[in-house]
Amino acid sequence: MPLDATLIGTASEPHTFEVEQGAIVKLADAIGDPEPAYREGVAAPPTFPTTFRFAIPGLADVDPARFLHGEQEYEYARPIRSGDRITCIARIADVREKETRVGKATFVIAEVEGRDDRGERVFTARSTLLVR
């Protein structure tokens, strides 16, 4: 599959993740965040969706050595909590080729939307990936 604008709108299959108390505490330890709600595993730190691992559509066959993670942002409708079951779908929002100091590179904007068991949006994550 070409790495160009034809990927825009491509979406992954849904993937459901169980948010476990221990995983929240482990991430809080790893990032050194002293927030009591995170240390007790009640609520997850804002970067918790990075622990949800699955392939981004159209990028699974690209050598990971060609990627550079440029930017990350999260938009929350509510906090992620221990016991949540979050179903995520990744979509390619944009693909652009740009000239950089080291030559042409492809910038891919990927969005991951996470919804709870009631189908309500919990978060949207946007990643900017540079592919050389």
Image (cartoon, grey):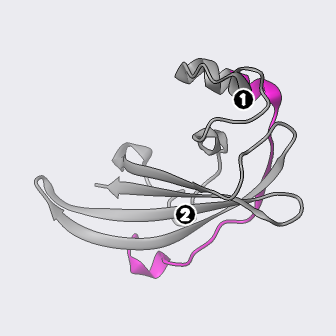
Type of residue at label 1? Ile
Residue sitting nearer the eye, 15 or 73 = 73
Residue beneath the point at 71% across and 46% down: 79
In the image, residue 92 above or below residue 55: below
Q: Is residue 39 left or right of residue 112?
A: right
Which residue is label 1 attached to?
A: 24
Q: Is residue 46 left or right of residue 15?
A: left
In the image, residue 28 above or below residue 17: above
The verdict on residue 81 being magenta is no
Q: Is residue 114 left or right of residue 100?
A: right
**From which residue to which does the magenta span run?**
1-25
Quick check: can you spot residue 2? no
Residue 111: give its label.
2
Secondary element type, mark 1:
helix
- Residue 19, by quadrant, is top right
Residue sitting nearer the eye, 60 or 81 = 81
Q: Which mark lies nearer to you, 2 or 1? A: 1
Look at the numbered discs 2 and 1 and tell me whether their residues touch, using CB distance below 8 Å.
Answer: no
